[in-house]
Image (cartoon, rainbow, N blue to C red):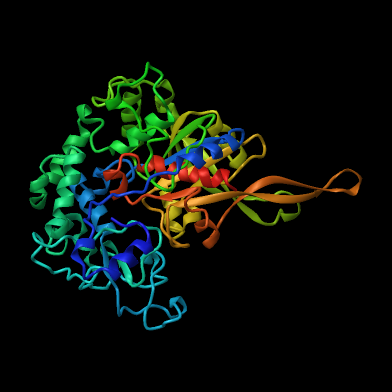
Amino acid sequence: MYSTIDEVSRHLRCITDTTTTASAADTTKDSCDTSSSTTYAHEHANNVPHLFLHFDVNETILLGDPAGGDSVHECVNKIIAKSAFVSTSGIHCHSDDLENDSTKPTIKRSPSSGNICDTHQFEPTHWWNGMSIDNDDCNSTPPPPLYTGWTYPPNTCPYYRTRYKVHAKKFTSSLHGQVYRPLYEELCQKLGLKNCAHDDNGSGGGSDVQQQQQPTSVFQNFLPAFWQTLMYYFPSTKTELPNNESAPSSAGLVGTECKILPPPPKVTLVLRTFGLDLPRVAVAISEFAKGNHPDYPNYSNEDLILAEGDLYCSGWSYHKKNGNDAKKEELVYSLHRANTNQEEKGKPVYSGDDDILNFLQSKSILGIQDNYPFWRENNHAPWAGKPVWTKTRVHGHDHHHVLLDDNIHNDPSDGAGGIRVPVVVEKDGDGGSSNSYYNRYVSLHGEEALALHGRHLIRVPTIRPSLEDDWFIRQIEMARWLELDT
């Protein structure tokens, strides 16, 4: 499995040597340089901000979406199809998006908005490494390595972004995707899924929905990587956990991207979703926090018990600006209680960035159902989705917000994650002097928001945390390192 274009390039240079072909489930990583990391941690020990972990739900920490009609087996197929890249050689692209060689178009971002290369009607014939997608000798041929990087390799796109997307829910049982069937079965086994051999006839889907609704299956279909992440950032308040239940240690994290950093002074978990799954997720996390997860019976931390009153719905509205810009409008984000009577419904309990940041700062865990109609009405633009805030060491907010979501794309006009930044306003002070201060926030648009991927936004290629239990932690620690390094 590859995550950088350099890895893809090396593979293509060695394509004739079959010994260099990586398996689809290859998760090899480099080790950390812990000697320099320890020094770095000491240097920044006094600058570590309050960490806010905003986690999307569906296909980020939880597989299966009964409300959306996707069974858990269909979700497993989809996450593989999203990382299985095909060749787009020869497809027409807009001229202003071509590299110096106009005969070789390069897709740099997600084509989901149709503004770069329209691959939705494209019928690919080969995988990115030149192997035919109609290869029926899948038992003897290693599958093309999956790709999970932020930038698309030249002349490629995901199978999921082509005309064959209609096959994605049964990808590994189709002619094209059967080469990845062993990986599908590996994922089913790791996630404890049953009936993976019978998902083709539809029986798996109905079974999934029924099992997800059973109270005894409250933990079913959550990625183990999520529980590992909770244990890492919210350590058990009980005595030291046995080795088989403990989260990875800082020194044990794998990957060149990790640094040993001092722990945050406080961590807040914010669940973010456009769907209706917050009550179920709240129950699962609360039961986990009470030590009722069968795999972690010795874990306990009351900070993760999520009460019904800690679930909110968000809203966006336009308000008149104050001062010289009174004729203009500004976009205001607000939170409303999710469970309230009809009389109180629609009334914001927290409105405006400062009000919301003050509230978030006081919590250890909460859930937010973000405003899907507003996002849809604005053509799924990132700024209209799930906002997080950049460095806010003003107004008493020493914060670092990170959103992890599978629906973040390297596309300035399509994605679920938005960025709110404080704006510097000049105001005359005493004696005619000019003082700078922050008095409001605005949403970043386009490339400015994309530039903060890795620090405030983390795209989740779900196949990664499905296979690697420390993947979330490694990405969060890298984001913390980037934030401290600025």
Q: Residue at x 22, y 66 (%)?
A: 164
Judge left or right: residue 28 versus residue 481. left
Tell me the quarter of the picture where residue 22 sits: bottom left
Query: Is 120 drawn above or below residue 308 in the view shown?
Result: below
Q: Residue at x 73, y 50 (%)?
A: 425
In the rendered image, the residue lying farthest to the top is 239
Q: Nearer the viewer, residue 479 or 443?
A: 479
- Kindly give the residue lying farthest to the right in the view shown: 431
Res. 307 visible in picture: no
Question: x%, y% of residue 199?
Answer: 11, 49
Q: Position of residue 249 (x, y in %)?
A: 39, 32
Question: Which residue is at 24% across, 38% downward?
Answer: 221
- Say which residue appears at 20% left-offset and 73% top-offset: 125
- Up the image or down, 90 lies above or below 350; here it is below
Nearest the camera: 167 or 126? 126
Query: Would residue 69 be visible to someone looking at this image?
Result: yes
